[in-house]
Image: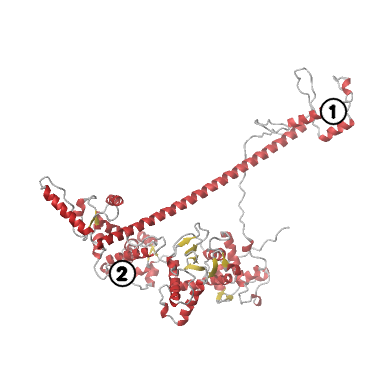
Amino acid sequence: MLTMTIDDVDHLIGLPSKGEELFEAPKKNLPQRFSQYKSGTNISFISLTDYFNKNKTHDDNFIRRVVLYTIGVFICPTLQQHVASDYLNLVENVQDIRKLNWASLTRNHLISCIENFHKKTSPTNLKGNLALLQLWYWEKFCVHELDPTSFATGRDRPLIQYWTEERARIRGDITNIKGFGYGQIIHDIRKPIKPPKEPSTTEDPNTYQERCQNHQSDNDTQATNTNLYESLQEIKAFMKAVQMQFLRLDKKFDDRARENTQAIQSINKRFDAFMKGCQSESQREAAKSNNLQTSDALQNEEPGVKKNQPDGRKYKKIKTYTKDDVLQISESGPKKKQSAGINSTENKSETKQTRKRNEHTIHSTVSKRQRPRSGRESKPIRRKDDDFLYYGTKITKPTEPQKKILISKDYMCTEEDYPIFEYIKTSPQKKLLVDMNDALVNKTNMECLLYHHRYVNSDVVNAYVCCLRTTDHLGYREGGKVYIENAYITAMFKRDKNLDIKGEPIKHRQFIANLACCYQDHDMVFLPINIVNAHWYLAVINAPERQIHVLDSSGPGNRDDLTYVLQGLENYLTFQDDENISTQKWKDLRVTTWPLTEQIRIPMQKDVASCGLFMLKFMEHWTGTRLDHNFTQEEIKKFREQLPVLLVKSPLNVIDITKGNAPSSKSDAQEGDEDDGLSIDKPIPPTS
């Protein structure tokens, strides 16, 4: 079996290999040194590079920061953008830095990362010094097609100096063509390698063939070595796993790009339909306005005489009549008029046929004059004292209506909640406001809900969890029977991930066994996960599907804290299983092997401090397959204002504020101290 030795690491990348072998950094806290180097909650790479750019001295602090940066980026790299604080113990004494066995540290860290990678069933990225692993593979499997002279001459320490970008690209192409494990195995990479010789013209062909046969027999003997075969299989399996990981990432990115493209196309179609609707509406309004203007102009025209007809007759312009006028004329008869140029016979009474003809002429003339436009521009019509009116085909783009944010009434405070909210704001800091089922919340803990920029603490989360547990319809959902856990128990899981439970007192063991039995009596367990002073999100243990559903208002992210919680939970469940205390309702108790599924792909949170409130709403509305209510950021803001009132006036709260000094009106509340916290908008009464 091929193994990577410390001497190999020394000869490959030139790290010191003398001294005691290091497996990991010593577990020793240096709070003063950590507070000196940290940026926020950790020692980030950005803070180290900023120090290098700004600082011009080269003291011991500069040397320590350089070594820490080298550890985090090259020697023991991880997926995080910071270096672990445990490595401060290795750089505390600057004089001893060069005496440490850094080659053993990077080798052991890489081997540990590979072992953890094989144990995990969920997709994850490989950690460790991958450049060292790639270089070791290339040097162990010599490919003479690359450059035969380099293997014979270029063997000085460190070997990484001979691998240029072009040479590495060619080596990768050879691996893609020939496959993994192709090449001559080099057992000692510190010695020069002699490439196979080509037959010369002066050499006896028989001698050359004999030497080739001997060389072939040696290769056959090496190929039959079982240890060599096992090592090749391990290397192939590892490289195949790395390739599968990259394929999963490519597929994930393709799916995300496809979803975004479909969303953009849907938005474009909706926008085009909206614009077509606006254009058709504008055209209908313009046509209606043109008809009204034309009708008014025709009614206001003075009667005149038309031009001569081809037969020489003259016709007087017919006056526009309504239906009532026509009926009146037919009943009373025609009016007699004396005018020059008209025969006296025209004054005779009209017959019934004449009246019908006149009525038909009136209606046909009115309909012709009021006909709609068809394929031509309307002519301007001028009145006596008006300007010209033009009616073109230009369509005015409608102004986009202002979006109105709709907030459900379930998140709005009522008139009765105002005195309670003011009572909370004016209470002393140490006054106990909520006491329900061992969940205690005083004014200091409640202040996280009185300011928009503060994170929700564990006391408030536990109090609201008590309220959710007593709500009957939340105990049974589409995914089955639900148990909602509080933040204290999940913190205990994280603490006890490596605890030897059998050595604990009997009361603690009994508590662990009862808790495990309670979980196995439910189909889903809701666990609030807290990244200390940073973030909240919800993890749902779905036993029927053997999955861990993650609901994070910020979208997919780092899940190290969830991993620690699952390790502690599995420790509890396996202890209960060993004791044979409960039934086997859960078919598999190895929750650390269950895959993690991100349920929130697009971030819902628009600020930096409302993650805890989103998590509480996830607990309330997650059915096991979906959210039964899609709440918004504006509703979460109103929920922050509503939550302290809900906790104080909850039936579970044993503290009765009516016996205190709660203000009964707004004037009474203004007598207290004013602050810059939230203020509840009084609800507007509905209009009739």
Give the quadrant of residue 111: bottom left
Q: Which quadrant would the N terminus be assigned to in this image? A: bottom left
Q: Which mark is residue 355?
A: 1
Q: Secondary structure at mark 1?
A: helix
Q: Where in the figure is residue 442, as x and y percent of width and height?
A: 56, 74
Amino acid under disc 2: Phe
Amino acid under disc 1: Arg
Q: What is the crowding at mark 1: few (fewer than 14 residues within 10 Å), some, or many (at least 20)?
A: some
The numbered mark, 1 or 2, whose residue comes first in the sequence reads 2
Q: Which quadrant would the C terminus be assigned to in this image? A: bottom right
Residue 382 visible, this angle: yes
Q: Secondary structure at mark 2?
A: loop
Give the quadrant of residue 375: top right
Give the quadrant of residue 87: bottom left
Residue 385 visible, this angle: no
Task: List the residue tagged with mark 2.
Answer: 23
